[in-house]
């Protein structure tokens, strides 16, 4: 249905663009026309066949839906209220206990975490501690080790272990605590929550207890609060230890950041040690040596998860010859029957806790290779292109939704190796087992369709490619597999072409009318190629880095839905004015475009433009900067360094003035401000106009770098820097080449939250302001020339 609507909109848009390119016809005498509910532009199609084809497709979809409806009635399916968000068999929710088989415990990190947690439990400060991590990482094992530690046993009068799981049944948890203390079995029929909680309070009143709540899922404070209130009746020093997969749960329950423990993965050697202990116990030395080589390879499949080592160990326990072990080593985790039964259910719990949109976003990550560093902005763009984030508007809400989805998945431990700038995720990875699970979901959902399509033949493209593209709407063509693009993959929405200088761009790329995200970076493109790409009117992201582009055609203005345009590392000198028609454009990447000397005069019309990535040297040119001075929504005018986003502006009496910064109050990251002047009159003018920069209004800048020319007038330097007062929440300040004898007054205000101050090459500075007034200052670096 999406495809049909796309084709209909595409036909309308194509007609509109073609009509605007044609000269207007002479006006005709007025005629009487009939009223119609069909849009007038529809009546102007040059070919009636377009409407007929779309009508036929609509009829096909209607026939398919009617067939599904008939089957539902034939099988007497009944639509019943959805009673739970987690349709997982109860048998998969194994109830944990405090008992532990110490011989199975592996890992130096486990012992280190255990020692730290025990130390905090014995202290008087912390009340709630949490162990957070993905399914199978060893959270419960760590909690069991702590629970059974001799010091803990002697310190607490009561030790209580409750397996919470999902849903969070407050009455059942309270009954479990009462039963653990009194050794009574509370009848299940007693559901008066008030009486149960009152009895719980009596049981623990005045007693020092350790309560372990294993496998907590709820993020709702109102479910946890009644239990929390009654647990306060215990003696001073009572502690709560929580295990959960979601960091949001730990924080909801009152755990401070320093009291959250995240178990690390086991090494391959530790996985092999555990796997060998389970699978080869009782075997003689010769057998151990025979299986060791292939066993170590199998251990790498565990990817550091103790649960995976347990599952594979039990699987190998009943395989008695080397060939059977080698078969396991050559198989993917998701192809092993015991993995599906024993390992993946632990991940299914996390998966079923997701909303339907989040499930789609998570399982889509299977398209990336294992151990791939996933770029957050790219992943969000692909989700958006596939329609996973809902309808796309020009106000940036869909990108914010993508960020929320990404953070949600990360907080549930479904991503790892997360790299952030500030609070924003830049890169992340998926744990290998989590990736295997995502692949399992994809294969399991679509294996019949893939098998069926694999039997079909196509004279143009690989049948397997067809099935993948048709089902997943995402296709990345590797080097050496460039083929013509036939109609059977025309529904693709995410399309990438790996760099291949030996092969030209595939013919028929203009047929991909549904594509929203297109990457051709590294492919040498001809002018005609680019004009064909400009016919893909639904494009939202277009990545053309390193494509040897010497000219950008005016047709690029036809891509009216474009939001991200990457033209970096190309050789064009300017951009066509038609680019100013891209009213939804948010990101324009012009890094390393060394021949670029100006931006379109109408660039101020791009009101949604938020990021212009450009080199520091390019950013100093007047014809590049003047146009962006009116873009009040701009957040980036610079580049991404190892320290994050750096916005760079050069100010000079004969170049850009301070007023170019006046309206750019949404700039984020670092602001690098270079000041150039050769004469006293020039410096007087800059000092007089420096206040026009209005740095105090740029509240999203966390780091400010001010670079003065070598030398200069001391009085004017002080007047200039006084006028460049930043906002009070600035975190880092760097001043280089300053010629004044004293520092500005605002620099020592007790209202400043600055944490780091760097002062370089101050030849004439004779004294410092009273730095002791700065409440948050941590680092002060002074470097004077020799």
Image (cartoon, helix red, strand yellow):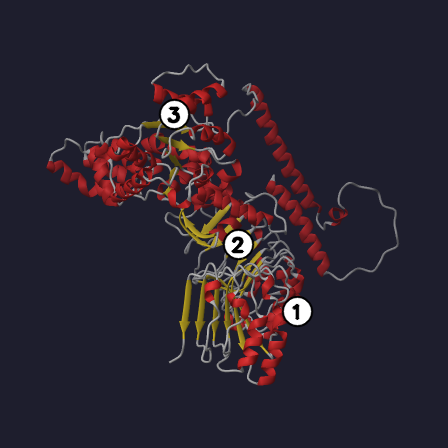
Residue contact between numbered discs 2 and 1, judged by CB atoms under 8 Å = no
Q: Position of residue 592 (x, y in %)?
A: 49, 69
Left or right: 567, with 57 as reference point: left
Camera-side residue: 550 or 561? Answer: 561
Left or right: 641, with 161 as reference point: right
Q: Position of residue 351 (x, y in %)?
A: 45, 35
Camera-side residue: 475 or 298? Answer: 298
Q: Position of residue 680 (x, y in %)?
A: 58, 85
Q: Earlier in the sequence, mark 1 or mark 3?
A: 3
The residue pinned by badge 1 equals 601
Which mark is nearer the camera, 3 or 2?
3
Q: Which mark is residue 481?
A: none
Q: Secondary structure at mark 1?
A: helix
Left or right: 282, with 593 as reference point: left
Q: Which mark is residue 204?
A: 3
Q: Earlier in the sequence, mark 2 or mark 1?
A: 2
Cα gap from disc 3 to disc 2, whole angstroms: 62 Å
User: Residue placed at 25% from the left, 35% from the top?
Assistant: 151
The residue pinned by badge 2 equals 518
Classify residue 630 by image quadrant: bottom right
- Disc 3 crowd rating (10 Å Cα; few below 14, some 14-19, many 20+) is many
Classify residue 635 by image quadrant: bottom right
Q: Secondary structure at mark 2?
A: strand
Q: Secondary structure at mark 3?
A: helix
- Disc 2 crowd rating (10 Å Cα; few below 14, some 14-19, many 20+) is many
Classify residue 17 by image quadrant: bottom right
Camera-side residue: 6 or 765? Answer: 765
Quadrant location of the N terminus in the rendered image: top right
Q: Position of residue 652 (x, y in %)?
A: 58, 78
Quadrant location of the C terminus in the rendered image: bottom left
User: Residue placed at 23% from the left, 41% from the top?
Assistant: 272
Rendered position, 112 above or below 349: below
């Amino acid at each position: 249905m999406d495809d049909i609507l796309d084709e209909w909109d595409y036909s309308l848009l194509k007609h509109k663009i073609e009509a605007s390119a044609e000269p207007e016809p002479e006006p005709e005498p007025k005629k009487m026309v009939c009223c119609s509910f069909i849009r007038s532009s529809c009546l102007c199609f040059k070919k009636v066949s377009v409407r007929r084809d779309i009508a036929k497709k609509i009829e096909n979809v209607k026939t398919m839906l009617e067939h599904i409806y008939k089957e539902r009635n034939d099988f007497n399916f009944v639509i019943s209220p959805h009673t739970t968000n987690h349709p997982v068999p109860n048998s998969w929710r194994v109830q944990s206990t405090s008992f532990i088989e110490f011989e199975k415990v592996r890992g130096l990190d486990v012992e280190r975490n255990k020692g730290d947690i025990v130390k905090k439990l014995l202290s008087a400060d912390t009340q709630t501690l949490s162990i957070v991590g993905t399914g199978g990482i060893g959270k419960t094992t760590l909690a069991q080790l702590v629970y059974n530690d001799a010091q803990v046993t002697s310190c607490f009068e009561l030790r209580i272990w409750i397996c919470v799981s999902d849903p969070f049944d407050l009455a059942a948890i309270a009954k479990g605590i009462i039963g653990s203390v009194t050794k009574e079995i509370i009848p299940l029929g007693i559901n008066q929550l008030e009486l149960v909680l009152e009895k719980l309070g009596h049981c623990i009143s005045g007693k020092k207890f350790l309560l372990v709540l294993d496998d907590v899922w709820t993020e709702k404070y109102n479910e946890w609060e009644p239990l929390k209130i009654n647990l306060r009746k215990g003696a001073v020093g009572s502690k709560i230890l929580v295990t959960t997969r979601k960091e949001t749960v730990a924080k909801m329950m009152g755990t401070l950041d320093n009291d959250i423990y995240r178990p690390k993965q086991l090494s391959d050697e530790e996985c092999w040690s555990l796997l060998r202990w389970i699978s080869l116990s009782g075997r003689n030395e010769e057998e151990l040596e025979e299986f060791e080589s292939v066993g170590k390879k199998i251990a790498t499949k565990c990817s550091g998860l103790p649960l995976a080592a347990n599952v594979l160990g039990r699987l190998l326990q009943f395989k008695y010859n080397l060939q059977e072990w080698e078969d396991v080593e050559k198989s993917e985790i998701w192809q092993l029957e015991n993995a599906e039964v024993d390992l993946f259910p632990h991940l299914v719990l996390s998966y079923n806790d997701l909303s339907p949109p989040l499930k789609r976003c998570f399982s889509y990550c299977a398209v990336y290779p294992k151990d791939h560093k996933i770029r957050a902005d790219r992943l969000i763009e692909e989700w958006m292109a596939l329609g996973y984030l809902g309808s796309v508007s020009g106000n940036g809400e869909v990108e914010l939704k993508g960020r929320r989805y990404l953070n949600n998945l990360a907080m549930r431990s479904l991503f790892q190796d997360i790299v952030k700038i500030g609070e924003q995720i830049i890169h992340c990875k998926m744990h290998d087992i989590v990736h295997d699970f995502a692949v399992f979901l994809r294969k399991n959902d679509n294996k019949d369709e893939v098998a069926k399509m694999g039997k079909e033949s196509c004279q143009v493209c690989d049948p397997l490619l067809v099935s993948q593209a048709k089902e997943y709407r995402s296709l990345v063509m590797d080097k050496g597999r460039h083929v013509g693009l036939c109609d059977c993959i025309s529904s693709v929405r995410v399309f990438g072409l790996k760099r291949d200088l030996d092969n030209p761009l595939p013919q028929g790329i203009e047929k991909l009318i549904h594509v929203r995200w297109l990457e051709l970076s590294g492919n040498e493109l001809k002018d005609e190629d680019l004009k064909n790409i400009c016919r893909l009117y639904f494009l939202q992201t277009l990545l053309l880095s390193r494509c040897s582009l010497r000219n950008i055609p005016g047709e690029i203005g036809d891509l009216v839905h474009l939001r991200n345009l990457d033209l970096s590392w190309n050789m064009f000198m300017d951009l066509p004015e038609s680019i100013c028609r891209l009213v939804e454009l948010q990101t324009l990447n012009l890094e390393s475009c060394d021949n670029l000397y100006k931006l379109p005069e109408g660039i101020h019309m791009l009101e949604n433009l938020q990021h212009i990535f450009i080199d520091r040297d390019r950013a100093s040119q007047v014809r590049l900067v003047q146009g962006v001075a009116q873009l009040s929504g701009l957040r980036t005018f610079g580049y991404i360094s190892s320290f994050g986003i750096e916005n760079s502006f050069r100010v000079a009496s004969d170049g850009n003035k301070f007023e170019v910064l006046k309206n750019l109050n949404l700039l984020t990251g670092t602001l690098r401000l270079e000041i150039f002047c050769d004469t006293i009159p020039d410096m007087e003018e800059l000092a007089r106009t420096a206040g026009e920069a209005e740095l105090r209004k740029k509240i999203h800048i966390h780091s400010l770098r001010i670079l003065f020319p070598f030398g200069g007038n001391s009085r004017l330097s002080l007047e200039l820097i006084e006028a460049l007062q930043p906002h009070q929440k600035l975190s880092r300040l760097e001043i280089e080449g300053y010629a004044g004898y004293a520092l500005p007054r605002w620099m020592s205000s007790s209202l400043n939250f600055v944490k780091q101050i760097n002062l370089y090459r101050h030849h004439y500075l004779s004294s410092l302001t009273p730095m002791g007034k700065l409440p948050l200052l941590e680092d002060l670096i002074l470097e004077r020339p020799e």
